[in-house]
Image (cartoon, coloured by chain):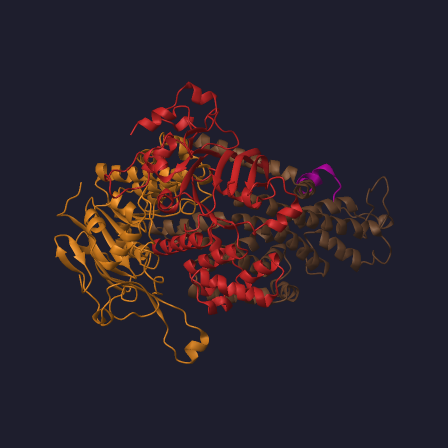
Amino acid sequence: MNSVKMELRKRKIKEFAHQVRVNKMAFVGSLTLGFFILVAIFGPILVPFDVMKFGLATEMLMPPSSQHILGTDDMGRDVLAYLISGARVSLMVGALATLLSMGIGTLIGIVAGYKGKVIDNVLMRITDFFLVIPWLPLMMVLAAILGTSIWNIILVIGITSWAGTARIVRAQTLSVREQQFVERTVSLGAGSIHIMIHHILPNVFPLIFANTVLIAAAAITSETTLSFLGLGDPSHASWGMMLHYAFETGATSAGAYWYFLPPGLCVVAVVLAFTLMGYAFDEILNPKLKER
Amino acid sequence: MKNKDKELLRVEDLRVHFELKGSMTGSLLGKKKKTLKAVDGVSFSLYAGEILALVGESGSGKTTIGKAILHLLDQTKGSIIFQGQEIGTSPQELKAFRRNAQMIFQDPYQSLNPRHYIMDIVAEPLDVNGLVKSTGERTRLVKEALEQAGLSPGEDYFYRYPYQLSGGQRQRVVVASALILDPLFIVADEPVSMLDASIRTGILRLMLKLREDKGLAYLFITHDISLAWLISDRIAILYLGKIMEIGSGDEIVKNGLHPYTKALMAIMPKPGQSRFDERPVLEGETPNAAIDIKGCKFSSRCPIVHQRCREEEPILREISPGHLLACHFV
Amino acid sequence: MKLLEVNHLHTYFKTGRGVLKAVNDVSFSLGQGEALGIVGESGCGKTTAALSICHLLPKEGFIHGGEILLEGRDLVALSQEEIRKHRWKDVSMIFQGAMNAFNPVLTIGKQISEVIVLHEKVSEKEALERTKELLDWVEIPRERHSQYPHEFSGGMKQRAMIAMALACSPKIIIGDEPTTALDVMVQAQILNLLEKLRKATNMGMILITHDLSILGETCDKIGVMYAGKMVEIGSVDNIFKESAHPYTKRLIGCFPDIDGDKVVPKGIDGFPPDLYDPPSGCPFHPRCDYVIDICREEMPSSIEIQGDHKVACHRWEDVAHEK
C-alpha cells in the first residue's frame, strides 16, 4: 500500500515540476536560483583560489585579467573566489533566516487564528508591535547588543520579519477554521493541536509557500544591507561584506568596478529570482485550489 | 432492531441560547443584549436502533439540537443523558461519548478536507482517539468501513482525493468515517439534501441496512417531511426551537393534529397530483428567533390562534400512546 | 403558432478538455399561458438550455445547431445588437441562487428600476413608479423599495427577483430552481405567486428543477432531460402515469409518496455520464434495465406516442406497458 502512496507522491512532484517548467516566471526564477545554489555548494571546489591568500602589494585592486577573471580586491585577493564563497554565506543566511521567520510567523498565525479570543488578542498585539517597529534601526540595535556573529544576524533578521507572515497566515486560518471539514474533525473528538497540524496547516500551506519565497528575497536583502552598513560578520564574508569593504577601502571612488559591481549584481539576480518564483508559485498553486 | 426498552439518549429541557453581539452605542445606552433562542426547551428520547426525524424549517433549531447533543455547541440549560448517565464535560468523558455518537454532515463537498487522502479521512476518528496500534490494523478497519458504506473494494479508494469522487461517493466516505468507531447512534444533518434524487436512495438504503445489521440509531435532521416519513420510525415537528408535535411517522403524516403540522402537510407536493387551487400557505415567514415570544411560538401565524395562546405556552402532552402534542386547542 | 418552439437545439461548450455537449438535441414547445416543467439531475443540461433561450451563455458556450422560435422568429439567427435589444424584453429569467445576486450597496428599488431604465425610454421617476407597481404584483409592501438586500429575508429577495424578471413585461419567464434554497412554506408561497402571475398575464412559464414533485402540481407539461437530451416530454399524467422511458420511471420512484408504500426506492445504479465522452448510442444505456443491443449503437430518436407525449427510447412500448 505504501508503494501506491509513493507513486502518487512522485506523480504530484512531477506535475508540479511540469507546471514550473511551463510557467515562464517560475522557470527563469528557478533556473537562476538553481545556478546560484550550485555555485554556492560546488563553487569553492571548482575555483581553487584560496580566498584567504593575500596578494602582494603590487597585486592590489587589479582590473580583470587572464589570471584573475574578475580582478583583485584591496587585499590582493581574487574577486571571483571571494564572490563564490560569498554566495555560500549570503544564501545560507538567507535560507536560515527565512526558515526562522516563516516558522515563527506560521506558528503564531495559526495559533492566533485558530484559538481566537484572548490568545488571539495577545498574539496579535505582539505581532503588531513587531510589524510597526522600523526593522533597520531595530536590527542595528540588536546587532549592537548581541554582537555581529553570523548566527546573530540570522536571528535578527528572523525576529524582525515574521510579523507580516503571521498576519497573512492568521487571516487564512480564520477562513479555513470555518470550513465544515474542521467542524467534522471536532465532532470526532480531535484536539486543537491535531486540527492545527492536520487540517489548518495543509490548507494554509500554499499561501505560506508563496510567501516564503518572497521572505527569502527580503532576508537576503536585509543581510546585504546589514553587512554593507558594517554590522555583518567579518569572519564570514558575504556579498554584503564585499560591498562594505569596497566602499570602506575606497574602491568605489577609485573606480574599481570589478570589486563592487559583481556582488551587487548577484544580490539583484538572486532577489529577482526569488520574487519571480514567488509570483509564479501563487499562480501555480491557486488554480489547484479552485479545482477542488 | 428497535428495542423500545433500551433508551439510548434522553434530552431534557434543552436550551441553546446565543448571545448576540450588541452595538457599541447600544451598550453605551444600556440596551440589553439580545439573545437568539435557537433551542428553547426541547425534550425527547431516542431508543436503540430507532430512527427519529427532527423536521423543521430554517430557524427551527433542528441542526442546533444535533450539534448540542454531540457537544459541538454549548448548551445553555438542560440535560443530555446518554445510556442513563449525564454526559460530563471533562475531555475524557467527552471522548468516550464521542466514540458512541457520530455525525454526518449535509454537504459532501465541504465536509471532507480536500487535501487528505480518503484513507486518512476515514481513519481520522481512529487516529484522533489513539485507537490503533499498527498500520495493518488501521488499513483493515478503513477497508472494512469503506466496504460497509458501499465502496467496494475499499483499497481502490484509499489514495484518492475527495475531488475525484462523486457527491454520492463522498457521502459514503462520510458514512464510512462515522462507522469506523462502531457508534451506537448517528446524528445525520440533512444527509441527502445536496444529492441528486437518484443518488439519495442509495444513501438512504445504506443507512437502513446499517440499522438492520448493527442496530444503529439515527437522529435524522431534515426539512423534507416526506423524506422523514419514508425513513424514520418517529417524527418530531420543530418550530422556533420547540417541539410542536411528536409521534410515529404515519401518525404525524396522516393524522397530524398540530396546526403547524397540518399546514406543512397541506402544502406538501404529492408526486403526480395536480393542484388546481392556491396552496393553503401560512402568512409571512418564520419570525426572528432573537425576538422574545410570549406564549406559544406559533401564535403569530396560527390559523386557530386564541388569546390564551399569546399568553401561555402550551406543554407537550401525550394525547394518544406515543403521540405528543403542544397545543391548547386540539 | 406556438409562443416558443425549440427544435433540435444543440449547445456546446469549448473547454480545455475538448467540446462538452451540454445540450445535445432538445426539442419542446410552449404555448401562450402554458407552464412547462423541465426536470433532470445535475449535469443534464437543463440550465444550459434555458441560458440558450435567453442568450445568456458564458463565452465558452455556443449554439451549435437547432432553432429557437419565439412567435415564429428564430432567436438563434439574431445579430449581437438585436440580442441586446431583445434580452429581457421577451424572455426573462430567475436564476439559481438569485437571492445572492443582489448588489448589497444599492437599494432593491434602485436595482429593479435600473432594469427598466436600461430597456425602456423612461425617466427615473417613471421607472420608480413602475417598480412600486411591480412590488405590488409580488406582494412586497411598496415602501420597502428603499431598503437594502440585507433587510430582506430569503423569500422576499426571491420575490424581488421575480419583480425584476417581470420588469419589461416579458412573454416568457424562466425560473431556474427558483425555490431550491427556500423553506417549504416560503417555497409554497413563491409557487403560488408564480401561478397567480401566470394566470394574470397569460405569459408562458418554464420551471426548471430537480424536484419532480413540484412540477406535478402546477405544470401543464413536463420534460425530462438526461445527458443533454430530452428523453421524454408530455402532460403531467403522461409522465407520472403513462411513462414510456426507463429513466423517467426510475426517477419518479425516487420521490417519496405518502399515499404509497413506505419502501425506499431502488434509485439508479451507476454514475451520470461524462459529457466530454458520452456513451455510444443512448446515453442512458449503461444504467438502464431495459437495455438491448441497439441501445448501445443507435441514439433513439424522439417518437410521438400520442399528441404531445413524446419519448426517445428504443423499447418504449415495453416500458409503457410495464407497471
Q: Position of residue B318 (x, y in %)?
A: 14, 58
Coordinates of residue C251 in the picture (x, y in percent): 36, 36
Query: Which of the two residues, B152 or A199, is positioned nearer the viewer here?
Result: B152
Residue C282 position in % (x across, y down) = 45, 26
Residue sitting at 45 percent across and 77 percent down? B25
Residue C296 is situated, as x and y percent measured from the top left of the image, at 45, 22
Magenta span covers which residues? A37-52
Nearest the camera: C210 or B37? C210
Q: Colour of chain C?
A: red
C109 relative position to C260: left or right: right
Q: Give the chain coloured brown.
A: A
Q: Is residue C128 above or below residue C250?
A: below
Count of marks, rendered view: 0
| The C terminus of chain B - image quarter | bottom left
Colour displayed for chain B in the image of the structure: orange
Question: Is residue B138 shown left or right of residue B86?
Answer: right
The image quadrant where one finds the N terminus of chain B is: top left
